[in-house]
Each structure stands twice: as C-alpha cells, then as structure tokens.
Image (cartoon, coloured by chain):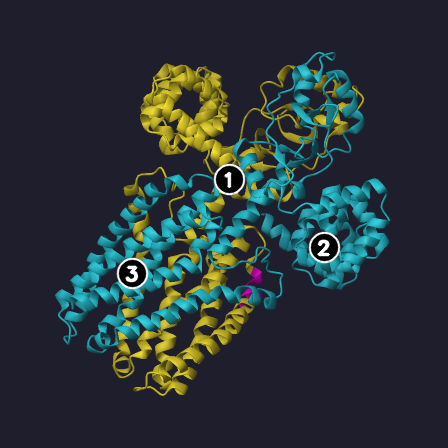
Chain colours: A cyan, B yellow
Amino acid sequence: MKRESNQLLVSSIRRFVRADRTAQLRKIVRKAHPADLAHVYGSLTPGQRRKVLGVIEDARKIGGLLAELEPTILVDIIDGLGDEELMDILTAMPPDDSADVLQWVGAERKDRLLGQMSLEEQSEAESLMGYDPESAGGLMSTDFIALGQQTTAGEALRQLQEDAGEAEVIFYLYVVNEHGQLVGVTSIRELVRRRPETTLEEIMITEVIRVGVDTDQEEVARLVARYNLLALPVVEPNNRLVGIVTVDDIIDVIRSEATEDILKMAGIADRDASPYRSPVTSFRSRLPWMLPSFVAGALGVVVVSFYQDNLVRLIPLAALIPMFMGMAGNVGTQSSTIVTRWLAVGKLEFFQIGKVVARELAIGVASGLCYALLIGAFVYLYFDARPGLVDPVRFAATTGGALVASMGLAAALGAASPLVFDRFGLDPAMATGPFVTTTIDVLAIWVYLATAAALL
Amino acid sequence: MKRESNQLLVSSIRRFVRADRTAQLRKIVRKAHPADLAHVYGSLTPGQRRKVLGVIEDARKIGGLLAELEPTILVDIIDGLGDEELMDILTAMPPDDSADVLQWVGAERKDRLLGQMSLEEQSEAESLMGYDPESAGGLMSTDFIALGQQTTAGEALRQLQEDAGEAEVIFYLYVVNEHGQLVGVTSIRELVRRRPETTLEEIMITEVIRVGVDTDQEEVARLVARYNLLALPVVEPNNRLVGIVTVDDIIDVIRSEATEDILKMAGIADRDASPYRSPVTSFRSRLPWMLPSFVAGALGVVVVSFYQDNLVRLIPLAALIPMFMGMAGNVGTQSSTIVTRWLAVGKLEFFQIGKVVARELAIGVASGLCYALLIGAFVYLYFDARPGLVDPVRFAATTGGALVASMGLAAALGAASPLVFDRFGLDPAMATGPFVTTTIDVLAIWVYLATAAALL
C-alpha cells in the first residue's frame, strides 16, 4: 500500500514538473507528509527537487523535509538556497534539527548564518553543534519542560497551557531544583489526577533514569529500549538538566546501528552508504575491505603450493578445496553472526565466553560429523566411478575427518572472535566481516591439506 | 556502567541464594527493575530463578518480569507456578501482555485459566490471542482512551482524571463516533490549551494514520518510524477502533526484525535463536542451512575435475582457486547486503533494479581491475621465482582478466538477487545467505578455470 502510494507520488511529481503545472504540483506537495516527500526525493532529479521546494510556502514544512533527508541530498539543497531563505527555514525548525542541518553548511557560511541569529539562539546552536552527533548531547532536543520542586500541580497545568506549543513532548515533566539540577520526574497524567495544591515534590519520582551529554547513542538506545521510555533526560556532569532525547530519535538510532552492524559484517565500513551516493565514493570506501580476501587468497596460494607434490599425485584433493572453504566458512559465519548479534542487543557478556565457545564448538563438530558422512559418501561414489591414483575408501575417510576438524575450528573461532574483539574495545561486527571469514578459509584449506598429506 | 551493574546483580543474587540469605535477596530484588531482572535471568540456574521469584511479593512486578523474558525461560517459569499464583499474575498484567504469556501455556491449562476469568476478560484475552502475534492485532494494547466527538475539553479532562490509571498512554486521545469508529485524534496537550467548553470535534485532527488488525508488524514499524509516532491506532475493517500499538513495542519489533535479517543473512533461520536455547535445537535448525554449501562444494568438485588435465599440467591454477572464491564472494556479499538493507529500511524499490545493478556492476568491475593488478603482480612474482610449466606473464594476464569478470558477475548477481527475491515475495535477506553466496563461489571457479583453459 505504502510502496504504491510512494511510486504514485514520484510519478505525479515528475509529470507535473515536466508539464510545468505548478498549481497541481503545489496541491499534491501540500497534501504530502514531509517524511514522504523526503522519501521520494532520492528518486527525483536535482531540477525536480528544486521545483518541489519552490512550491512549498511553509518554512516549517521545508524544515520537516530537510530534517528527514539523506545527507548527500541535503547538502545539495542547502547549497541551492539563499542565506535569507535558509535562515527562515532554520528558525522554523526545532533547535536540535536546525543544529543538525547547520553541520552540513560550509564553515564560512555557517559563521555568517550564526551571526544573524539572536545571541540566545546562537549560543544554543553552537553548544548543540559542539556535541558528538552520536552522543546523547548530539541527539537531544532543548525544548523540554522543567518545573521547580515547589510548583503546585495547579500552577504546573496553567504553565503548560502557556508553554505547550514550544515543547516537543509534554508527557514527562521534569522537576529541577534552584540550580537547574534534575531531581525528579512526573507526568501530565499525574498532574490531572492530583489536587491542584499538591507540590511537584510530593508527586515526583526521584529515581530518574538519565544519561550524560557524552553518553554514546547506542547506550541511550539500550536504556530506552530496555525500560520502555518515551524520553530520557540528558544532564551535564554536574547533573544540570540540558535536554531530552525522545523515542522517535531512538528509533532512528536503533535502525542505523543495525544497518551499521549489517554493513560491517559484509565488509562495508561506510555507515552513510545510501543508494544515492556516487558509485565512485562507494567504490573507494569498499575497496580496502577486500584486502583481507586478497591476503588470504595469497596465503592460500602459498599453502596449496606447499602441498603441490601431493596435488600433482592426487588431483581430486584440489577439487575438494572449495568444499572445505564453503563448509567451514558457512558454520564460522553462523557462529560469529549470532554471537555478534547477542552482544549488540545486550544478551551476552564477555564472562560467558567459555560457555558460548563450547556451545558453538559442539554445534560445529556435530554439523561436521553429519556432513562428513555426506561428503565421505559423495567422495567415495564420485571417485570410485573414476578409478585412478586414489583409494576411494581411504580418501573418503580422510576427507570426512578433516571436515569435522575444520568445521569445529571454524565454529569455535567464529564464536570467540566477536567476544575477544569486544573485550579489547574493537567493534564485534568486524569479527564477522572479511578478516575472520578469510582467516577461517585459509585455516580450513590448511587443516584439509595437512590432514591429507599425513594420512594419504 | 550498565554492564557492570548487571554482572553485580547476577553475582549478588547467586551469593544470596547460595547462602540462603532471603532477606538480603528480597531487598536487592525489590530494588531491581523488572527489565534488569529479566535480563539477568538467563545467567541464573532454574533453582536460582525459582528463589528469586519466591521473594517477589508484588504480582505486578512478576508480571513485568514475565513480559520481558525469553520464551524458553518463560515456559519453564510458567510450568513451575500453581494455577492460582499464575492467575493472580495474569490479572495484574496489561491484557496484551497477559495474552502473550497465555500463548505459552499448554492448551488444557489455558482453557482452565480462561474459565476462571470474568466473561469480559475471557473474551478480551481470546480475541487478543486470535491475532497473528506478528500483526498489529497481536501487538496492540486494548487499554486506550477513546472519547465521543461531542465531549468537551473540560469533560475530557475530568474523565482522564478518573481513567488515567487504567490506560497505557494518554498523550494521544482518540475520538470515536457513536459506532466506535475512529474519526479523529487529539492530545492532552491540546485539551489543556483550549477553553473547557470546546468540543473534541472542533479540536481533533481528522487525518489519522491508522492500521488494520492484520497489518504486518514490519509495516506498523515502518509507519511509526517514518512519521515519528508515539502510538498508532488499530482498527477493524469497518474502522472500529480496537486498540493501539505503542512505540515501545515498535522498538522491540525493529530490533527483532533486524536480528531476523542479520541471522538470515548468515544462514540461521531461527528467529528465536537465543544464547539460552539448547545447542541441540540450534544444531538441528542450522544444519539444513549448510546444505547449499555442500551442494556448491560438490559442484566445485565436478567443475575442477572437468579441468583436471589442465590442473595436472598447471598446478598453480589450483592454488588460485581460494583467491577467486574469496574475492568474488567478498564483493558479492557487499552488493547483496547493501541492497538487502536498503530494501529493509524502505530506501529502494524494485523499479530501480536497473540503476542499482549497473551501479554495483561498475563497482565490482572497478574493484576487479584494482585487484587484478595486485594479483597479476603477485602471480608474476611468485611463479617467476618458481620456474616450471607456466609462463608467468601470460598466467598473470589470464588470472587478472578472469578476476575482473568474476568480480563483476558476483557484484551484479549479488545486487540483483535480493531485488528479484523481494519481487517474487521471498525474503530478500535469503539472497545474502548461503544460497547466493555459494552460487557465486561456483561461478567464480568456473569463470576462472574456463578462462584459463581457453587462454593458457
């Protein structure tokens, strides 16, 4: 349903732009949600994007659109806007979103724009831009409601009626002391249920889950997910409340962290990898990630050449190399992927390494035994039908034994690597990527050829 | 910080259980959040879990714990509870959570428990259990606030003061007509800002984003993420409002969908794969996923044997097989992973297949050219130093050419497969798994050996 309606939106926009039917374009754009416009923007040409932008009159709607755009497209649009126009849009956006957009503006122009803001806006924008974009400070919104401890429920409700338009969310109300330090939390739901003269101090919960401005976004997401929160207060080291992170931003974090992990597992480091990036950029960022495969391949050449004499005598040995790489790689990837994911969602910790590696080793060896029977049978039948240098029974037995060994090894290594990477502060997702995969490949070939050399 | 505190919680629980210090155990358990207790439950033995459960007096807290547990542990705990005890806990839970727990109770016992409920509770539980757990109906809560169109803001606020304790969230207020059909939405924030005599009809927004009871959870998550919603109303086909899905449940959906995709890419179908499952179950579910590797390996044997005569004459050919598998597999995995992820997060649609495949083909060929130079140089140097049957220059050129071809092919196939899988209603994540990977492996070997046979 959604997909079709997006395709419809794209084709209508294209048609109206081509036919220069501005009134109809304006009508369809006005009806579309900014998030949907952002979504179809990637399918439009730069010229079409400009036309669409031109028919949106509401600066707030343009702001909503900019906040949802891919960085590459965003930069393009910013560059096409005049200073005054951009300034109007930035002013209409919530401060955290406008700070995010400002990050993509060139240094000189950014200074110029900041200079045009009021001193308060300027210092707010500058302090927001000062935080790491992947920290709680970088995610937070500064539009929140904080009330004093002595405020009564009745006063609080009155104050809400005046301020509500400004604040992003008002389901949680934070309570601060005279120094602006976070001392409690309550909800509008509590306010309406209490007698008007009750003070917030009497209503509030004092054990507030909070994060520091420097807390990593992954940790923020974990807290929001675990405790089912709608917003999380952000404090400075002295406990002064400076912002809130809302759950809608956390959804984006959870998605982009999952994307980052998935791409890393495939050997793509580039977290912004988007279909709208230039292939040249993608090519450059991906190229080095193939180096481990190359090194492993080169090591493979050395290993195979080392057993060259055996291979000349016994060419079927070479024929089974892909089988060993495939099977060991497969079980190793299963183990490393599952352990990496458990780590990412907080289901596993380092102290459990012994149990997990033993578990995966057992699975690897058991799978190895099953496939050893299959491969043994295949090798026996295939090479029995092609009589030559090789004794089919012995060859089948050797192959099967080597398979069990290399699959067990691959599973144990696959399970241990992410845990060890994590322990040493490296990203466990790297352990599922090319580095470990190719190590497993070379080890599998070596185990196989060494076993064959010893036994045949 | 969080990790350490969890390890501390586990070790304290273990110590107090071992030393039979019930008072201290009760104290630490009372202070712990149900979500944290659920998290550490996996690290406890069944005996320790029973002891912990025994010291929680508040049925609502036990309910909160059960709602967060892994299914395998949950079933174990349910089986250890008496009917009366379980009934008390279920009654204390929100209806959607208790319906989820009831799913894991055996059929006979479930009927017995349902028989003890009031007719209203029973029909609510039964209708909730009737929905697919992965649909909007399966996710939704039935605790929501719906008010009539003619209700005034003042009345609405008064009603909230009475009902607020029951409903899960009250930041959105849904407006229904006399047939219970959804006609609008407003927020408590609007209520407090308006004059008390305004009717909801005047305040409400009528374009409400809604889903049907059968809408798949992935689509629900996409809507919540795209439009930054805190809750989404769920309606029957006749537009009668029957529940709401809240954003905290959506976070779990987004995480578990990402996990499912990640595991599927690694050839693990089992979405409940958890560190607490028995290795035997995991072994059984993973074993068939290695079959494609086996089949590919067997095909590899056939392909290599077909070029047997060349290999005997030219053993370095065999030495380069792992290199070809590794490089082609690597670039193919990059392409299929990135396309799969774009599909999953809605950044790509089928009609863009031509552009995407061309893009990935270009990246594959460009990467192939770079590594062809490297491999050519390596082959030249390595085999020039080991004079034998092979002309190093010709061998290096052949190898390089074959590499460009197989990497380009792998990238194009990797990019096209998820799109084609998706088009035919198959899960695109499968296209990143063993099926496509092993197809690429065999193709790479074949391209390599066929090129070598033709040119050397």
Quarter-of-image position of residue A355: top left
Q: Amino acid at mark 1?
A: Val
Q: Amino acid at mark 3?
A: Phe
Q: Given this view, does label 2 or label 1 mark the residue nearer the observer?
A: 2
Dot label at residue B253: 1
Q: Which residue is disc 2 drawn over?
A: A104
Q: Is residue A318 magenta?
A: no
Number of labels in the image equals: 3
Q: Is residue A349 above or below residue A411?
A: above
Q: Secondary structure at mark 3?
A: helix
Q: Amino acid at mark 2?
A: Trp
| Residue at the image point whose x is 33% and y is 28% from the top | B76
Taking the image as shown, residue B26 lies to the left or right of residue B160, namely left
The subunit carrying tag 2 is A
The subunit carrying tag 1 is B
- Considering the whole magenta stretch, tell me its main secondary structure: helix
| Residue at the image point whose x is 79% and y is 21% from the top | A158
Q: Is residue A87 above or below residue B412?
A: above
The subunit carrying tag 3 is B
Quarter-of-image position of residue A239: top right
Q: Secondary structure at mark 2?
A: loop
Q: Dot 1: within a 10 Å radius of its alpha carbon, few (fewer than 14), some, or many (20 or more) residues?
A: some
Taking the image as shown, residue A326 lies to the left or right of residue B160, namely left
Cα–Cα span, label 3 and label 2:
49 Å
Residue A293, image x, y percentages: 42, 66
Q: Which residue is disc 3 drawn over?
A: B294
Look at the image and give the residue range highlighted in magenta.
Answer: B351-357
Cα–Cα span, label 2 and label 1:
32 Å
Taking the image as shown, residue B341 lies to the left or right of residue A9, namely left
Residue B52, image x, y percentages: 39, 22
